[in-house]
Image (spheres, rainbow, N blue to C red):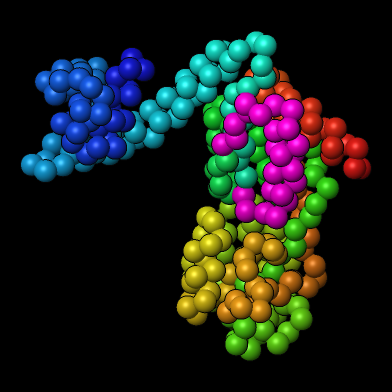
């Protein structure tokens, strides 16, 4: 399977038409159509549904789009690392992480490193631990920021000098907002909006003293911004970390910590035996210098 043809296929999925993709690729429409038919013949599956106005994807086409995107991203990343000038440390660093105020620590490393190596570029990917570790394992990320507990068997890591606290995000005018803390008995009958991260339910089952799934879970989220909008509109109470959503005087929301307190540590992780680009290696060295020095 030719990487060039995968790029053609992805261009068609973006433009949703062969004519639009051919124009973007600066090639003729018949040539592009031939390449796509050859790709379908090679795979032995129909990938595209050719409609009158737009092209859509079959189920196999959607799978190929996902995998082709990962393959092309990895090829581009590798080419950039191999062609970076020897005399200048430059290139791209890919960092993934969940929503946490501890990302400020990563931003400070990047800012500090930028003073010495202004040609380094940073690419941030936001997702929960499952998303981040999947991309780490595929080589699409150099580093990940994981909220404990996390499965660390495949990774080396630095524990960050920061912690987050779990609690409930809720409207300021709801009855629970008058409490200073939230106890297990308070949440049993509440409509809960929870993170869809795999490890979260296990941790909260321990805090709750019963199966997490017995809660009234009305929604789940990947990133908390949209979950906060749901809370504002009264759908439910968001189980989340502190300092992620604006709860200032002008906000309609407030955050109340859980009791007993659920405090979590955070780690900067990377694959064991990882071969870094020079840029990523400099980033790791700077992180070790800063974080190990602060312990």
Which residue is found at the position 62% from the left and 66% from the top? 245
Q: In this view, does 97 lie above or below 249?
A: above
Q: Residue 264: x percent and y percent?
A: 76, 55
Say whether residue 103 is left or right of residue 78.
right
User: Can residue 232 be seen at all in this image of the molecule?
Assistant: yes
Comparing 118 with 28, the one in front is 118
Say whether residue 62 is left or right of residue 239.
left
Q: Is residue 205 above or below residue 9?
A: below
Comparing 111 with 17, the one in front is 111
Q: Is residue 147 above or below residue 140?
A: below
Say whether residue 215 is left or right of residue 272.
left
Q: Residue 111: x percent and y percent?
A: 71, 39
Q: Does the magenta segment cover residue 110? A: yes
User: Can residue 215 be seen at all in this image of the molecule?
Assistant: no
Q: Does the magenta segment cover residue 89? A: no
Q: Quadrant of residue 170?
A: bottom right
Comparing 233 with 63, the one in front is 233
Say whether residue 186 is left or right of residue 223.
right
Q: In which quarter of the image is residue 16?
A: top left
Q: In which quarter of the image is residue 133?
A: top right
Q: Residue 27: x percent and y percent?
A: 20, 20
Q: Quadrant of the N terminus?
A: top left
Q: What stretch is highlighted in magenta?
A: 98-123
Which residue is found at the position 76% from the left and 81% from the top? 180
Q: Residue 89: x percent and y percent?
A: 67, 19
Which residue is found at the position 76% from the left and 78% from the top? 181
Q: Is residue 168 above or below residue 15?
A: below
Which residue is found at the position 70% from the left and 80% from the top? 185
Q: In which quarter of the image is the C terminus?
A: top right
Outermost residue on the top side: it is: 86
């Amino acid at each position: 399977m030719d990487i060039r043809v995968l790029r053609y296929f992805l261009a068609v999925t973006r433009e949703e038409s062969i004519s639009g993709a051919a124009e973007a690729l600066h090639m003729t429409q018949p040539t592009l159509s031939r390449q796509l038919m050859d790709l379908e013949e090679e795979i032995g599956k129909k990938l595209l549904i050719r409609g009158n106005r737009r092209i859509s994807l079959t189920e196999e086409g959607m799978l190929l789009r996902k995998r082709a995107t990962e393959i092309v991203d990895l090829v581009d990343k590798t080419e950039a690392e191999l062609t970076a000038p020897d005399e200048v440390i430059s290139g791209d660093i890919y960092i993934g992480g969940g929503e946490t105020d501890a990302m400020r620590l990563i931003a400070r490393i990047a800012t500090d490193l930028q003073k010495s190596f202004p040609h380094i570029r940073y690419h941030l990917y936001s997702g929960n631990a499952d998303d981040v570790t999947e991309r780490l394992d595929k080589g699409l990320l150099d580093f990940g920021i994981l909220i404990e507990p996390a499965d660390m068997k495949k990774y080396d890591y630095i524990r960050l000098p920061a912690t987050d606290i779990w609690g409930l995000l809720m409207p300021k005018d709801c009855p629970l907002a008058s409490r200073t803390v939230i106890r297990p008995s308070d949440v049993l009958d509440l409509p809960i909006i929870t993170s869809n991260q795999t490890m979260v339910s296990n941790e909260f089952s321990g805090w709750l003293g019963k199966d997490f799934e017995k809660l009234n879970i009305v929604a789940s989220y990947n990133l908390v911004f949209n979950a906060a909008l749901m809370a504002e509109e009264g759908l439910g109470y968001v189980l989340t970390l502190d300092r992620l959503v604006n709860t200032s005087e002008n906000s309609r929301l407030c955050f109340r910590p859980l009791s007993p307190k659920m405090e979590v540590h955070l780690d900067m992780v990377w694959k064991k035996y990882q071969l870094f680009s020079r840029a990523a290696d400099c980033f790791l060295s700077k992180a070790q210098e800063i974080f190990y020095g602060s312990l």
